[in-house]
C-alpha cells in the first residue's frame, strides 16, 4: 500500500475559508476547491469520519509527514 502524506501547513492552507464544525466530506471538497495538491486531498479523504471543530483537530487527525524523519 502506498502512503501519500501532506504537511500541517498544506492542510491549513487547503482548508482556508472553511467554517467549522465540518465533516470529512467538507474537508475534501474545500481542499479541492482551494486547489490543494493530490496528497493533501487524499489525506483529508482518509481522515476518520467525524465532525471536526477546528483546523488543528483536522491536522491532528490526518497523516502528515511533519513528524517523520
Image (spheres, rainbow, N blue to C red):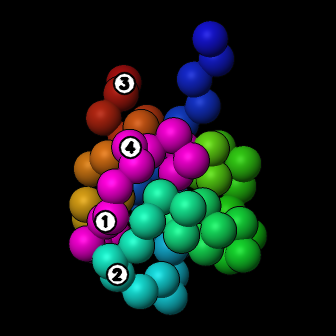
| N-terminal-most mark, 1 or 3 | 1
Frontmost residue, 8 versus 24: 24
Q: CA distance from mark 2 to mark 3?
A: 32 Å
Check disc 2 and report the residue beneath it. Answer: 20
Q: Viewer-nearest of labels 4 and 3?
A: 4
- 52 drawn magenta: yes
Inter-mark Cα distance, 2 to 4 = 16 Å
Helix, strand or loop under label 3: loop
> At numbered mark 1, what does the secondary structure look like: helix, strand or loop?
loop
Mark 1–mark 2 Cα distance, whole angstroms, equals 7 Å
Closer to the observer: label 1 or label 3?
1
Residue 22 is at least partly visible in this image: yes
Secondary structure beneath label 2? loop
Q: Position of residue 4 (x, y in %)?
A: 60, 31
Query: What residue did someone put label 3 on?
Result: 69
* Label 3: how many Cα within 10 Å (few below 14, some 14–19, many 20+): few
Q: Which mark is residue 42?
A: none
Figure quadrant of the N terminus: top right
- Magenta range is 43-55
Write down the residue under mark 1.
52
Q: Measure how far apart labels 4 and 3 are at the Cα level.
A: 24 Å
- Report if the CB atoms under discs 1 and 2 are less than 8 Å apart: yes
The mark tally for this picture is 4
Amino acid at each position: 500500500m502506498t502512503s501519500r502524506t501532506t504537511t500541517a501547513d498544506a492542510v491549513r492552507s487547503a482548508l482556508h475559508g472553511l467554517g467549522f464544525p465540518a465533516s470529512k466530506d467538507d474537508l475534501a471538497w474545500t481542499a479541492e476547491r482551494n486547489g490543494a495538491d493530490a496528497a493533501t486531498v487524499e489525506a483529508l479523504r482518509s481522515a476518520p469520519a467525524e465532525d471536526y471543530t477546528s483546523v488543528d483537530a483536522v491536522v491532528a487527525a490526518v497523516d502528515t509527514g511533519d513528524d517523520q524523519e
